[in-house]
Image (cartoon, rainbow, N blue to C red):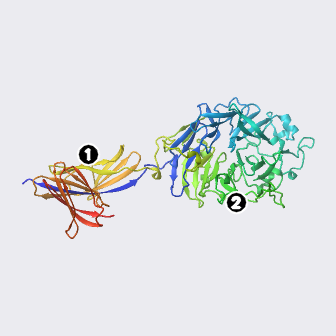
Amino acid sequence: MKQNYFLGLALFIIATTTFSQENTVGTIIYNPELSDGGYNLIYPHNQSTAFLMDMCGNVVHTWEHGDSLRPANVLYILENTDVITTYRPADNSEDAIWAGGGGASIERRTWDNVPIWSFTRNDSAYRLHHDIQPLANGNVLVTAWEQRDSLECIEAGRNPANLTGDGMWSEVIWEIGPDAYNEGQVVWEWAVWDHLIQDFDSTKSNYGVVADNIHKININFGQTLGAAADWLHINAIDYDPFSQHIMLSVPTFNEIWIVDRGNTTSGELKWRWGNPMAYDRGDSSNTKLGFQHHTHWLDLALDNDNADYGKVGVFNNRVQGDTSEYSTVHTLIPFYDEYENEYAVDAASGTFLPTDFDWTFSSPDPNTIYSNIVSSFQRLDNGNSLICSGKSGDTREYTQEGELVWYYKTPLLNQAGMASPVSQGTVLNPFQNLTFRAHRYPADFPAFDGIDFVAGAPIELDPTPIASCLVCDLALELDSISYDSSSANISIIANGSYDLNSIEWINLSDSSVIPYQNELDFTTTQSGDFLITVTDIMGCTTSLVVSVIIDSVDSPSPLAVGLYPNPTTGILNLVLNASSGNALVSIYNMQGQTVFTSNNSNSPNALRFDLGHLNNGAYTIVIQTSTGVATSRILIQK
């Protein structure tokens, strides 16, 4: 007698995500629940593009410069979508003034990188460098080195032993605005040279008692840098429109300065903090800062009800001097009397208040926040801290409790003065991916209104998204089932146009691995629970369990039926052998009562039923066709 078979299938889906390796560049850690989120801006050294990225490191916008240009060192996005960018020539071998942080040009551009106006100064007298600060009136504050020859320096009271034949570079702060021809011009200037004091030579200018002139700048103070003429090396500038004060970071003095922009005609140095030795008050035990970067008012980016409103933030590069192997970040509170336009001084010591930091953060592993140059610190809206250790291109976001919730490594390798993307898995060493600063813009930043960001590829090559960045909509479903001789032929399909990396079939009954045939087609003559696991090239993994029951029955011809998902929340899919013909489907509860019927007169291969009206529980489904009868148990779980 010819042997016939009844085949019943129950399916359910297990969705998981994996990745094949631990990332070394790009986004390495991302906890969406604890991160403040938004978009991250970096403008790494030794290449020509500023990148705006989502939290997973996917580039959503760029501002490109010519191949012969390099960052100088920042780009700011304005609320109207314009940007203020900085750049310099890649070749500085013939430049009269050059040191780390050197710039040349600032330029206002549209979101789409179309120039609006620009200003360049890079000659034997002046050179723009390091940082800029856009103003509400459309102008820009810039820092510039100012060449002073040796004779000028000696006449100003500089010790000749601390001079080279090139003299020294002082500093000026310029406000730059566009003229009628869209060319930048200087509309305001503040010069360090106008605010000097010295106690070295009573026959020269600026002579006086340094400790009695705490609003003056000692021309004979400051550490020596690689470029001997680089006296102050101002590396950050900020502006408070309320007080009309300018904040400067002076790393060679280990000090933060605040200069009056609008309330006095003299441009007085109103406040200084970090190293009282710079004005002959205190000793090394009073020094709080070490070659600091990114000094700024926190409240300019925060709501006035934020706990950090009115505070100053700073990345403290060298905690224990030049030989330190870790850095810290801090907030502090200047004691400012807005009515008198004065900052408080401690009566006993004659030093500017406060006496110490308001808040300090250092990593549990000191080497994870360390950079003796460049770097930045930003307090985010939710209280988290975004910290860029620029020497290693390492940017991390920490909660107030110190939990690391986002970690990004600039994936660019500097070789022969040009930085190029590296492949995921590359291990980069310090100085190979220098990043001056990182900045987070919130998702609701006004410039982003109406912009439909489309996530492009990450900067790194061969990217491997981490688990929290995978968009895993990979899914499996039963496509068809058929009977051939004594075997059941099962065909599964994956949704979308996926490039599948691996497919595995496992008989869970005996743990044997069954070689697949024709990718997602499988043939079996055995009953059992078969686990199909599919992984695509992005690392998304989805599994489908097929329960196969093969029974010998007496019927004219074989009947093959597939049911999924089982258990179901209400929707039940039924796949019939193409030769089954018309089907009568009946569903019975456990008391034997008919609760659902469907007469499929058109005999399609696949049927879909909505059983959402039935109560949770076990039911029996009976499928009758001209070729046989199939019975199976289904479970409704809503």
Taking the spot 76% from the left edge, 48% from the top edge, the residue there is 253
The picture places residue 623, in percent across and down from the top left corner, at: 18, 58
Taking the spot 72% from the left edge, 58% from the top edge, the residue there is 333
- Residue identified by numbered label 2: 358
- Residue identified by numbered label 1: 517
Tag 2's secondary structure?
loop
Q: Quadrant of the C terminus?
A: bottom left
Answer with left or right where residue 380 lies relative to residue 551: right
On residue 283, the disc is none
* The residue positioned farthest toward the top in the image shown: 94
Answer with left or right where residue 328 lies relative to residue 513: right
Answer with left or right where residue 441 lies relative to residue 249: left
Is residue 158 visible in the rendered structure shown here?
yes
Distance (Cα) linking label 1 and label 2: 67 Å
Q: Amino acid at mark 1?
A: Gln
Pick the front one: 459 or 525: 459
Cβ–Cβ under 8 Å for marks 1 and 2: no
81 over 576 or under it: above or below:
above
Q: Quadrant of the N terminus?
A: bottom left
Near mark 2 (Cα within 10 A), the count class, few <14, some 14-19 or many ≥20, is some
* The residue positioned farthest toward the left in the image shown: 1
The picture places residue 632, in percent across and down from the top left corner, at: 21, 61
Residue mark closest to the camera, 1 vs 2: 2
